[in-house]
Amino acid sequence: MQKQINSGIYILELKINHEFQFSHKKFGILKLRKGFYYYVGSAQKNLSQRIDRHIKKNKKLHWHIDFITTSKNVKVSRVFTISSANKNDECSLVKNLENQFNFTHPIKNFGNSDCNICESHLLYTPTKINHSHLFSLYQSTVLFIPSSKEIC
């Protein structure tokens, strides 16, 4: 049984094997290339349920990230959570990840409609990051949350 975490921030590691396009009313037609994407989000309540929802392929499109995670070309390969963090830590985490891993922002203002600090909360790199480096940065707070469904 999965441990329920009520609040915190999370990182979705998304693997895209083939370039694909999608349409969003705010952003228009967007193209994402092959590689790894890291989406930083937060939930002030029901964090475990939010993560489970992000992993599902079939869902009503609500959050920006839903337009990506519902694609057959996208796999949520890992989920990292920092359950002790509050919403204010979300932007700090984005900045730290940008600096540590030299990420780029594939879509400006994506996933950060309630933030005027970050360029976006979706980050891109052509190759997978070293998870042990991530753990060393946040070793006391990062927790793997296994999904009720297999994540590959």
Image (tube, rainbow, N blue to C red):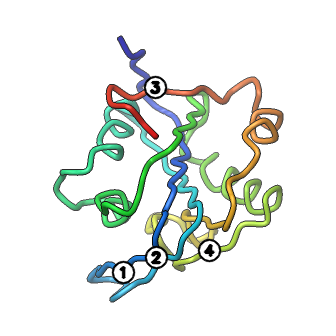
Residue corresponding to mark 1: 21
Residue corresponding to mark 3: 146
Q: Mark 4 falls on what kind of element?
A: loop
- Please name which of the two marks, 1 or 4, marks the residue nearer to the observer: 1
How far apart are labels 3 and 1 at the CA level?
A: 29 Å
Residue at x-position 40% and y-position 84%: 30
Residue corresponding to mark 2: 19
> Relative to the observer, which residue lies in front, 132 or 81?
132
- Pointer 4 and pointer 2: residues touching (CB < 8 Å)? no
Residue at x-position 49% and y-position 27%: 145
- The residue type indicated by label 4 comes to His
Q: Mark 2 falls on what kind of element?
A: loop
Residue corresponding to mark 4: 105
- Please name which of the two marks, 4 or 3, marks the residue nearer to the observer: 3
- Pointer 4 and pointer 3: residues touching (CB < 8 Å)? no
- Please, is residue 112 above or below residue 77 in the view? below
Q: Is residue 117 left or right of residue 129?
A: left
Q: Mark 1 falls on what kind of element?
A: strand
How far apart are labels 4 and 3 at the CA level?
A: 27 Å
Label 4 or label 3, whichever comes before in sequence order = 4
Label 3 or label 1, whichever comes before in sequence order = 1
Label 1 or label 4, whichever comes before in sequence order = 1
Q: Mark 3 falls on what kind of element?
A: loop
Q: Position of residue 1 (x, y in %)?
A: 35, 11
- Pointer 3 and pointer 1: residues touching (CB < 8 Å)? no
- The residue type indicated by label 1 comes to Gln
Q: Position of residue 123 (x, y in %)?
A: 61, 65
Q: Position of residue 90 (x, y in %)?
A: 60, 50
